[in-house]
Structures are given as structure tokens and as C-alpha cells.
Image (cartoon, helix red, strand yellow):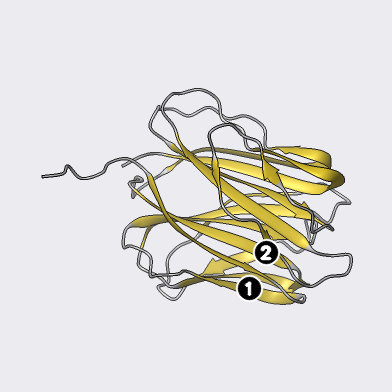
Amino acid sequence: MTAPLSGPRFVQTAAAGESASSTTLTATFPTPTGAGHLLVLAASVYTGATNQISKVTDPAGNTWTKIGAYCTAGHFSDGELWYAANANSVTSVTVTVAAAAVIAIEVNEFSGVATTNPLDASGGASNTGTAAASGAITPATSTELAVGFVAGHGSVQAISVTAAGYTAQSQQTSSNGGSTPVSVVSAHKVLSSVGSQEMTGSFAASMYWASGIALFRSA
């Protein structure tokens, strides 16, 4: 008889990008999520500090908590992390902003994560250039789950996740065109030590970027 798998495990991703500015964006999972799993949302919004995501909702009414919104004054470069712990099964997740904006999101599902008080630490940053870095954070235990993202603004260029040992999802880029596209790439890593963690990425041409990372306790 095979022993059950333990520890945090990636299950699936839901992703979506706007084709035009809107106040909402919905991402649909390939299959319904598992009951009691952790859902982590990474978002890229073409806005600054005045029109960030106001709420995240889903058909099951799960409670979504903002981890952080990372932007720089004067930059249209908001990147955000949200999560729902011990979530009821859902088929989709929706983000809402007050004023129409271009948005791209990725929502990752994980099993094997603590169902109460799962968030251990988080960090993030925003700037402009050809490389992104969230800033380093240190886990309390060696078996935690690290989830991060790199977001790009005003460009459709490819983003490479350069953080060692992280598994990245496919980049999600809005299809609105013009000068206001956004992109986001999320990535995760199941830790095996208490070494510091940082989400980093690179791209060929300078652009506004945001990057964030969160550490979650294992079950």
C-alpha cells in the first residue's frame, strides 16, 4: 500500500488577462478546487496606489485576505498577493477594482498547507529596470511553501523567473494592446531548509515591475 503524500503540493492554476479595461476579471480553474486547500492569487494591475484591487470573491464565498500590494509612487505598476485558507471548493475567482483598469491574474491551488493561520511571512517591492526582486524573507520552519510572482507593466515582453528552485507557471499577459498591457508570472517552491527566500525575475527591456513573495506553513 502506498503511503499518502504529505506536505504542500501544487494542484492547478487558473489564469486570465483583460482584453480591455474593466472593473472585474475572472479566472476559471480547469477542474473544481479541493475542499480545504489553499488558494493564492497573484495580480498585475495597470494602476498606482489609488485603484488597487478592492476585493477578491468566488462562488463559495471564501474569505480572501490581502497579503500585500506593491507599487511605487508615480508608476503604473501595482502587483498584489491575496490568499484564501481552508477554502471551500470553487470553480472560479474574481477580482474587482473601483475604476476600470487592465488586469492579469493567476490563482494557484495547493494542498497540504495549514488550514488556520497559514501565512508565516511576506514581502514585496516595485520599481523600474530589467530585473525584479521582492526582497528576502526567512521562513520559521523548513517545510513551508513559498509562493511569489513577478509582474510587468506597459510591456508584453517575456518575464523569466530567476529565483533558484522555483516552478513557474505560464506567463499571463493582457491582450488589450496599446501602451497599457500588464503581465504576471507566479511561481512556487516547497522548502527543505530555513534559508532566506526571494522572488526574482528578469526581462530584456526596462519596464515598470512589481514582485512579491509569501511563505505558508505546512499542515
Image point (86%, 52%), residue name: 75
Residue 184 versus residue 28 in the image, above or below: above
Image point (62%, 29%), residue name: 136
Q: Amino acid type of disc 1?
A: Leu
Mark identifier at residue 104: 2
- Residue 13 position, x and y percent, is 49, 60
Between 157 and 63, the one nearer to me in the picture: 157
Q: Secondary structure at mark 2?
A: strand
Quadrant of the image for the N terminus? top left
* Mark 2 surroundings: few (<14), some (14-19) or many (≥20) residues within 10 A: many
Q: Is residue 210 left or right of residue 129?
A: left
Q: Amino acid type of disc 2?
A: Ala
- Residue 91 position, x and y percent, is 43, 73
Residue 119 versus residue 65 in the image, above or below: above
- Residue 120 position, x and y percent, is 46, 37
The residue singled out by tag 1 in the image is 25
Mark identifier at residue 216: none
Image point (55%, 55%), residue name: 82
Quadrant of the image for the C terminus? top left
Q: Is residue 80 left or right of residue 108?
A: right
Q: Secondary structure at mark 1?
A: strand
Q: Tag 1 or tag 2, which sits nearer the N-term? A: 1
Q: Give the quarter of the image for residue 32.
A: bottom left
